[in-house]
Amino acid sequence: MQHDNSEIKAPLLKQVSKYLLFILKVIGFVKDDDFGYANNESGDTESLITPIMDVLRDFRIDIKQAVSGKEIVKKDVMNILDNLRDKKLPNLGIKLEDRKEGSIWSYVDRDTLLKEIRIEEEKKESKKREAEEKKAKELKEKSTPPELYFKEIEPDSKY
């Protein structure tokens, strides 16, 4: 007997996911706090998605403001997109990466992600400082030393 019932049974799916999560916890692949949504017995999904929806709402407002002027400035829109990727989503534990084949996202521990970002920013700042120091050193090497500013040059006897 075959049933042509392609409808997804949400309660059954939830029970199966809880069971699989339980097995993964027993084996040691998953910690209790890895999948907080599966442990949400109260069914209060609004409290789970509120931070994400707040970020999306703010993003939408920023984009609307950027394009509401007479002229759309590509740089402003790109700055808003970068701010979403680099500042707002990491605070939610969401890592968004731009790649050749498109953007991918992953859910990462918030503190670990913020630490990675801080380390990357320190590396960039260090490289920037090194480049400035190198540029200053090269400029100093190319410049005339102050003691030679007023040095008299002996006339050449040939002329």
Image (cartoon, rainbow, N blue to C red):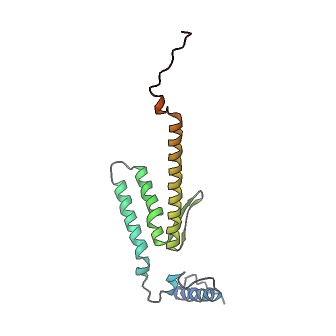
Residue 34, by quadrant, is: bottom right
Q: Nearer the viewer, residue 34 or 43?
A: 34
Answer with left or right where residue 60 lies relative to residue 130: left
* 2 vs 88: above or below: below
Quarter of the rendering occupied by the C terminus: top right
- Tell me where residue 154 appears, x and y as whole percent: 51, 17
The residue at the point 50 percent across, 72 percent down is: 111
The residue drawn where x is 45% and y is 28% is: 149
Is 1 drawn above or below residue 155 in the view shown? below
Q: Which of 72 and 11 is in front in this view?
A: 72
Image x and y of residue 122, in percent = 51, 59
Q: Nearer the viewer, residue 127 or 93?
A: 127
Residue 114 rendering spot, x and y as whole percentages: 49, 68
Task: Name, please, the residue furthest toward the top.
Answer: 159
Residue depicted at x 53% and y 60%: 120
Quarter of the image with the N terminus in it: bottom right
Q: How many marks?
A: 0
Work out whether 110 lies above or below 9. Answer: above
Q: Position of residue 91 (x, y in %)?
A: 45, 70
Q: Which residue is drawn at 52% across and 69% down?
A: 113
Place residue 17 in its image quadrant: bottom right
